Image (cartoon, coloured by chain):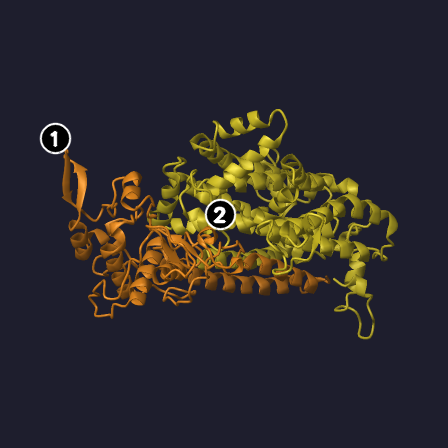
């Protein structure tokens, strides 16, 4: 009986843990790419986060906001510019310098006038557009999504970001791409309406308003890493993954301690159980 | 809580208190001395596990409410802020979000255990009905909790579910407007959901108190389904079951921890990390996994009102189950035919859950398009849902009432102790124990 029960429970768990099969439009599954932060012991690679931040700052941030991010986050534990010498990220000179390179709108407390002042570590990443209408107007009607939690907002987030950035392709013959749109086989969507080829051979993927944002050599990495398209895409995917889940390393470290504790506790309880029940026929 | 009390106050303060408010006596009688059948297996540990789940949800939930902002403009960001800037906020929030899933895993096992071992039969009908009330309250609480982060699935899930009430004739529209606090799902809806999400868990805790009270009057059922006959059949709850439940709870917490620490978003939906936007509808609106079987039943019916009635009927039928099952034998251990139907029922529930996550018109077996009957494509999830829905209701309304009258059950043991003594592990070498008596 118990064995059957366990088999049933295992079946139930297998069904639960099977990746929820929500049809993913017609997009290709994301490319396989390995990141240092995967698995129970995975950690972010600080040099990669720094490179990724540079890609975000020099390329992505001209259209994409990161409204949940503050400059201080860059210097917090696990962040791209964390330095053990500055446990308070607000003291971190890198963070201060980066923030001060931006001009931030504020109110002069004496006069009430709107002024520009250099950013501080307490400021949010500035939004590239003052409002949604302005963002759409500059991007052919499309709204560049906020990237703060992008790695959590898509299935297989880091791989998805990497695949979109490196996956642009010339549209196959027979696919009509409207002006301001681009074909990407990793983008969710359905291109059937724009397809004039055979009905059973509709190309995978969808249209995306973002033009291919990255190209080899576009960002110069300060650590001498070769600036290929794949490298830039991978680094910025890592940066966005960190921004989406900045407490991931803390979570996994805490989890390891919790697991060890629980497993030892379970062992002790099982031993107690056997001892207490040893004289009871059951 | 009932019956004879063996509590003897030992200290002066206990004696003083016992004549004024016998709470120590209550605790002693219900958690230490309580006579419990000695043959309970691990399926019986889920009651304790559920109590722990409820406590975790209430404690983490109260802390989250200190930081959460119930406003459509701030809810999403406030949840993320909890994860980023509140000390151990990520832990509290992930425990709460995954805790809901763990709660449902445990409650489904607990319910299935009750179904298999006939724990709903006399004299435990009230105990069972109180359990159904708890389950109903849990579903309402979980649904409203999922709306609070105000992501895309929160918002559109709330729209879909509240619109169901619009299917009711005459009063439907008025009820939906009343639920929304306006003419669409908006800030008033979020505010009242937050308020109710905070209230309902305490109502659950109250009904859990009644559930335990109703358990302690007739005492536990047990895997044989045979009544306790003598003191031989029982052991005191403490330390025998405190240690066994404690072990099971910690093993369950290990499963819980693997989700919280290593896969915190595996049971959720990625779309809920996109802020709720009434103008953009997600491609597929799906509820959390624990509602998928009911979602499949809802979509199996072509008529909206019919679907709503059937979905609620799927839960309502549980309330009258004690009077639907005609068998006098409690445990299915001695009902081989019922055991088979029960196994199909479990598979049916899993199939319904799977169908609930699929698009209704998609093919069950891809590439096969020959299963057509008139207009119906039988090789589609909607048809699989229909077949499964049919069996779900048939199990309660046809199988259990008829089977109890027609089947021939296996012989039941005289008492709880007798199969224990004839258990293969305790039998003298060479003595063959009857297989149906195996624990």
Whole-percent x, y for residue A212 in the image: 31, 58
Tell me the subunit letter for badge 1. Answer: A
Q: Name the side, left or right, on which A3 lies relative to B77.
A: right
Residue under the image location 21 percent in, 68 percent down: A223
**For the point 38% across and 62% down, which residue is it?**
A163
Q: Position of residue B55 (x, y in %)?
A: 52, 45
Q: Is residue B25 visible?
A: no
Q: Give the Cα distance between marks 2 and 1.
A: 50 Å
The letter of the orange chain is: A
How packed is label 2: few (under 14 Cα within 10 Å), some, or many (20 or more)?
Answer: few
Mark 1: give few (<14), some (14-19) or many (20+) Cα within 10 Å.
few
Comparing labels 2 and 1, the label whose residue is closer to the camera? 2
Answer whether residue B412 is visible to the viewer in this image.
yes
Rendered residue at 57%/51% (across/down): B357
Q: Residue furthest bottom?
A: B430
**Residue hosting label 1:** A111
Label 2, on which residue? Answer: B283
């Amino acid at each position: 009986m118990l064995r059957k029960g366990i088999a049933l429970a295992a079946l139930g768990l297998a069904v639960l843990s099977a990746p929820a099969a929500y049809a993913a439009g017609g997009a290709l599954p994301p490319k396989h790419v390995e990141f240092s932060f995967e698995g129970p012991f995975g950690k972010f690679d600080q040099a990669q986060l720094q490179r990724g931040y540079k890609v975000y700052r020099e390329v992505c941030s001209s259209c994409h906001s990161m409204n949940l991010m503050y400059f201080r986050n860059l210097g917090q534990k696990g962040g791209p510019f964390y330095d053990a010498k500055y446990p308070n990220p607000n003291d971190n000179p890198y963070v201060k310098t980066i923030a001060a390179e931006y001009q931030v709108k504020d109110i002069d407390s004496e006069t009430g006038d709107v002024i520009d002042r250099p950013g501080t570590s307490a400021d949010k990443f500035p939004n590239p557009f003052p409002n949604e209408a302005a963002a759409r107007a500059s991007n052919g009607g499309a709204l560049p999504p906020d990237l703060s939690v992008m790695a959590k907002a898509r299935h297989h987030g880091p791989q998805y970001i990497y695949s979109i950035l490196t996956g642009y392709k010339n549209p196959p013959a027979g696919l009509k791409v409207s002006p301001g749109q681009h074909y990407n086989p990793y983008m969710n969507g359905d291109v059937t309406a724009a397809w004039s080829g055979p009905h059973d051979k509709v190309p995978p993927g969808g249209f995306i308003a973002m033009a291919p944002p990255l190209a080899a050599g576009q960002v110069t990495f300060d650590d001498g890493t070769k600036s290929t398209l794949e490298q830039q895409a991978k680094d910025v995917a890592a940066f966005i993954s960190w921004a989406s889940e900045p407490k991931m390393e803390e979570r996994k470290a805490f989890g390891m301690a919790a697991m060890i504790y629980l497993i030892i506790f379970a062992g002790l309880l099982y031993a107690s159980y056997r001892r207490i029940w040893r004289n009871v026929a059951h | 809580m009932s019956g004879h009390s063996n509590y003897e106050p030992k200290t002066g303060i206990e004696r003083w208190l016992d004549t004024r408010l016998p709470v120590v006596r209550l605790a002693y009688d219900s958690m230490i001395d309580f006579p419990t059948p000695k043959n309970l297996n691990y399926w019986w540990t889920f009651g304790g596990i559920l109590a722990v789940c409820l406590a975790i949800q209430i404690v983490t939930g109260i802390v989250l409410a200190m930081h959460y902002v119930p406003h459509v403009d701030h809810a999403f960001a406030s949840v993320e802020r909890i994860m980023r800037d509140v000390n151990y906020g990520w832990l509290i929030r992930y425990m709460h979000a995954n805790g809901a899933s763990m709660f449902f895993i445990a409650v489904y096992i607990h319910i299935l255990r009750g179904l298999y071992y006939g724990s709903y039969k006399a004299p435990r009908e009230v105990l069972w009905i109180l359990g159904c009330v708890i389950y109903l309250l849990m579903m309402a609480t979980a649904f409203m909790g999922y709306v609070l982060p105000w992501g895309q699935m929160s918002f559109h899930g709330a729209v879909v579910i509240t619109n169901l009430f619009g299917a009711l004739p005459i009063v439907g529209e008025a009820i939906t407007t009343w639920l929304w606090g306006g003419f669409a799902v908006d800030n008033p809806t979020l505010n009242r959901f937050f308020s109710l999400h905070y209230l309902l868990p305490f109502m659950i805790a109250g009904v859990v108190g009644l559930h335990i009270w109703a358990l302690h009057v007739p005492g536990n059922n047990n895997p044989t389904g045979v009544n306790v006959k003598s003191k031989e059949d029982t052991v005191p709850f403490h330390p025998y079951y405190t240690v066994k439940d404690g072990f099971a709870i910690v093993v369950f917490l290990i499963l819980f921890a693997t989700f919280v620490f290593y896969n915190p978003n595996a049971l959720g939906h990625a779309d809920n990390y996109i802020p709720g936007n009434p103008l953009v509808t997600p491609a597929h609106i799906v509820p959390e996994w624990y509602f998928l079987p009911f979602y499949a039943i809802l979509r199996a019916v072509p008529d909206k009102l019919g679907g709503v009635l059937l979905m609620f009927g799927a839960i309502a039928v549980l309330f009258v189950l004690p009077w639907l099952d005609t068998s006098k034998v409690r445990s299915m251990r001695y009902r081989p035919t019922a055991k088979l139907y029960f196994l199909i029922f479990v598979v049916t529930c899993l199939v319904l859950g799977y169908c609930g996550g699929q698009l209704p018109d998609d093919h069950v077996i891809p590439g096969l398009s020959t299963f057509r009957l008139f207009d119906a494509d039988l090789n589609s999830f909607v048809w699989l849902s229909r077949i499964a829905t049919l069996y779900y209701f048939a199990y309660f309304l046809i199988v259990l009432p008829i089977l109890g009258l027609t089947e021939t059950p296996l012989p039941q043991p005289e008492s709880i102790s007798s199969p224990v003594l004839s258990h293969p592990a305790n039998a003298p070498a060479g003595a063959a124990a009857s297989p149906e008596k195996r624990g």
